[in-house]
Amino acid sequence: MASHAHDHEQCISEALGSAERVCAQRGARLTPLRKRVLELIWESHEAMKAYDLLDRLGQEGGSAKPPTVYRALDFLLAQGLVHRIESENAYVGCRHPERTHEFQLLICDDCRHVEEIAVSGVTEALGKHAKKQGFTVTSQTVEVHGQCPSCRDRA
Amino acid sequence: MASHAHDHEQCISEALGSAERVCAQRGARLTPLRKRVLELIWESHEAMKAYDLLDRLGQEGGSAKPPTVYRALDFLLAQGLVHRIESENAYVGCRHPERTHEFQLLICDDCRHVEEIAVSGVTEALGKHAKKQGFTVTSQTVEVHGQCPSCRDRA
DNA sequence: ATGAGTGTGTTATATTGTAACGATAATATT
DNA sequence: AATATTATCGTTACAATATAACACACTCAT
Ligand SMILES: [Zn+2]
Ligand SMILES: [Zn+2]
Ligand SMILES: [Zn+2]
Ligand SMILES: [Zn+2]
């Protein structure tokens, strides 16, 4: 386990609090199921896979099937409460769900820790280049793979 | 079909020529199968899926199965002859296989045309930010989705 | 020739993701 | 309140993407 030391209970409670808040503001329904899936994603700061969520839900007595979790993920993605990691087919919670935003992800290939960052200039440079070619940008996927500090120290 | 007008026959022949050359230099074996898969990927500048390659190979008489095409893709990726599009589970030919390089992709969500670009500053900005956090970068995935000029003009 | 390494064929299976339909629950309208 | 409408959820079945494992053939070096 990577250290990345912090009070993760607070991390989770802040995330769920933000989620309640933004959903209330938008009239979006954060149902118990959706909230539970979000909570499971926030179980850690590591990339979480859909079928791992499915397993977790299954252990809780319910008989969850794939559509259940994929629908919840669709909702959470639409509300910006989680981000999808394209290069991992996985998901991670977002700390800034209040408004949509461009972002980049640092993904540790050793421990799967995911860090959301916002490097100034990246989105702008891409957008500018695209515009010069007449390309209209609607979304970006920026995922940086490598090794996090904890894993490097351990090695 | 997007216009993106150019002599695509030459496009293909240059790509295959480069492939022969770099493989020869490296002592890598561009077998007939691998070369055929590369040629199929260069059929267009659009994102090509593994199972579409499989279909194409199947139509040519052979009885190709998934491992056949995935192995060929593994080889082509390792040699830098094609790039994988993570957000599409698809593949596209690379024009600069001589040396490994960072790159970004502009992907048209209307016509699936893919353009490989190298925006100066993007890799550097990401690398610098990562380093500041003690994160060691090994690879990047940068995929920009939107609408290409041809598709915008058509609309 | 023997053995190691590589490439390919084949079977089977794992992983990731959707379509479609019905039941139920929340919301809106009368 | 009663009804109509919509959103959510459960369920079955399946589609799409990818890999494991083993067998065989070929090359090259001993
Ligand atoms: Zn975010
Ligand atoms: Zn790590
Ligand atoms: Zn390239
Ligand atoms: Zn287009």
Image (cartoon, coloured by chain):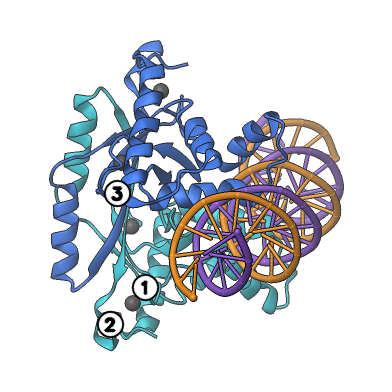
Chain colours: A blue, B cyan, C orange, D purple
Q: How many angstroms separate mark 1 from mark 3 (CA)?
A: 21 Å
A109 left or right, relative to A100: right
Q: Is residue B126 visible?
A: yes
Residue occupying image coordinates x 53% and y 52% = B75
Q: Chain of mark 1?
A: B
Residue B131 at x, y percent in the picture: 22, 27
Q: Is residue B20 visible?
A: no
Residue neighbourhood size for the residue with mark 1, other residues' Cα within 10 Å, grouped as few (<14), some (14–19), many (≥20) = many
Q: Earlier in the sequence, mark 2 or mark 3?
A: 3
Residue B59 at x, y percent in the picture: 68, 79
Q: Is residue A88 above or below residue A59?
A: below
Is the CB of mark 3 within 8 Å of ligand 3?
A: yes
Query: Circles 1 and 2: CB distance less than 8 Å?
Result: yes
Which mark is drawn over residue B150? 2
| Front-lying residue, D23 or A43 | A43
Q: Earlier in the sequence, mark 1 or mark 2?
A: 1
Q: Quadrant of residue A140?
A: bottom left
Q: Quadrant of the C terminus of chain A?
A: top left
Mark whose residue sits in front, 2 or 3? 2
Residue occupying image coordinates x 60% and y 35% = A52
Quadrant location of ligand 3? bottom left
The amino acid on which the numbered mark 1 sits, given as a three-letter code, is His
- The residue identified by callout 3 is B101
Q: Are marks 1 and 2 on the same chain?
A: yes
Q: How many angstroms separate mark 1 from mark 2 (CA)?
A: 10 Å
Which mark is drawn over residue B65? none
Is the CB of mark 2 within 8 Å of ligand 4?
A: yes
Circle 1 — which element? loop
The amino acid on which the numbered mark 2 sits, given as a three-letter code, is Ser
| Front-lying residue, B17 or C13 | C13
- The residue identified by callout 1 is B113
B119 left or right, relative to A93: left
